Image: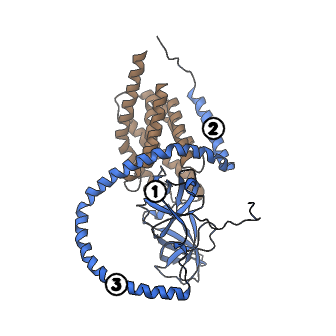
Amino acid sequence: MKRRTKFHINPKHVLIAGIILCLGLIGISFRFGEHLTPVRAAVGSVFVPMQKGINIVGSYISGKLDTFKNMNDLLEENAKLKDQINVLIYENKMLLQDKYELDGLRELYELDQKYLDYPKVAARVISKDPGNWYSVFEIDKGTKDGLKEDMNVLAGNGLVGIITEAHYNYSVVRAIIDDKSNVSGMFLKTSDTCMVRGDLQLMDEGKIRVELIGKDAEIEEGYEVVTSHISPNFLQGILIGYVSDIELDASNMTKTAYLTPAVDFEHLEEVLIITELKEPRLDEAPTE
Amino acid sequence: MKRLIVYLLEIILCFVIQTSTFHYFELADVMPNLLLILVVSNAYMRGRLTGLSIGFFSGLLIDLIFGDVIGLSALLYMVIGYFIGFTNKIYSNDDYTLPIVFVAISDLVYGFFYYIVEFLLRGRLNFLLYFSRIILPEMIYTIAASVIFYKLFHMINNHLDRKINEED
């Protein structure tokens, strides 16, 4: 008994239909991209729990592998570190004294440590973009926890990136080392502005490019770059990294430099999200 | 019907493994393209129609979760699946080298078109760098992974064939 009936569809016709469908989808997502968000959110909420689960397994295995690999290194390091501790205890005492002095001076100058005061939420990195071309990743917090699009993401004390999509229980983050990322920055010491632009070419060296520095900017290697006051999305004064290899451009108008990010992007597991948005520019008063 | 469910499960599993686990096993900063292996192996084993539909759905999944533009990866994976489907005519049950060659070729094509669409159109002209930094390592790693994964998919496919023949 032949139960299965053979379908006689010419694969060529299916291909043509598929191509038309895809081109249609591309067109739709260019024109009405924002209307597709609910569809993406629905798909995402199905996959995120699975990714979370598998992620735990993966990090467990790779953690175990790392343990074996690093055992010898660790023993050596341990001995070295013990020596260091003694030195550091002494230094720490000296530094504490300096700190009290610094606190006093800070009050005098009314310096406020701006981004220590921003409200923050911690999240875990659960998955990474499937290709090798970009540095986009997902975190396990979403609108449920008060996250919104364009919120800034930090790790340690430096800028990691920005939320490009916020969904119910997950969000998508674009790292500043991503090829499509542009951040408006500023040199902390001289207040000269610049553009910090991710570049795949430099990603291997762990660096990103800094462009459009004014010709007369008096900057030196090792200066800190922070997010600037003119950036529309990034809050002011978050550390991005340290500048190096400053060069004058061929146009003789601007300088270009490299920047070493303050964050270790290779081993990013937990991040902090500032749950405060930079004041949006509005034409009219908000209706509330 | 059973086949359909198995394909769906394969796509979902591959996608989840690819996004959540593979970046722990990165070598030279790249990871193997598991979904492409899935598309190519099934296209080779089952033909054009299977190739293009699996390609379409796995591409769509990538677009929906990660892409900016929905439909781009779907198109790319689908076309690759369709053309690899032609090789079904020379399919042999115990040839394990040929599919790996096809995986290599399609990963190369995939990388090349991805570069054109996402990078060349934004004015990144340094093709050689992207070739040696991403396309080539990814291809090699994917080939290595496909040695294992093709056997797995092949096993699943044979198992399915046998089950369906028994029922007839």
* Total numbered badges shown on the rendered structure: 3
The answer for how far apart the CA atoms under marks 1 and 3 are is 35 Å
Q: Chain of mark 2?
A: A
Residue that mark 1 sits on: A124
Task: Tell me the kind of residue under disc 3.
Answer: Lys
Query: Can you tell which mark lies on residue A93?
Result: 3
Please indicate, yes or no, whether residue B131 appears anywhere in the rendered image.
no
- Left or right, residue A147 beside residue B98: right
Residue that mark 2 sits on: A21
Give the number of the mark in front: 1 or 2.
Answer: 1
Does the residue at mark 3 contact the one at mark 2 (Cβ under 8 Å)?
Answer: no
The answer for how far apart the CA atoms under marks 3 and 2 are is 68 Å
Q: Quadrant of residue A194?
A: bottom right
Q: Chain of mark 3?
A: A
As drawn, the residue found furthest toward the right would be A284
Which one is in front, B25 or A278?
A278
Q: Check disc 3: other Cα within 10 Å, few if <14, some if 14-19, many if 20+.
A: few
Q: Which chain is blue?
A: A
The vertical placement of A204 against A95, above or below, is: above
Report whether mark 1 lies on the same chain as mark 2.
yes
Q: Position of residue A93 (x, y in %)?
A: 34, 84
Q: Position of residue B48 (x, y in %)?
A: 51, 30
- Tell me what hue chain B is rendered in: brown
Q: Residue at x 48, y 30 (%)?
A: B5
Where disc 1 sits, the SS reads strand
Q: Residue at x 53, y 19 (%)?
A: A6
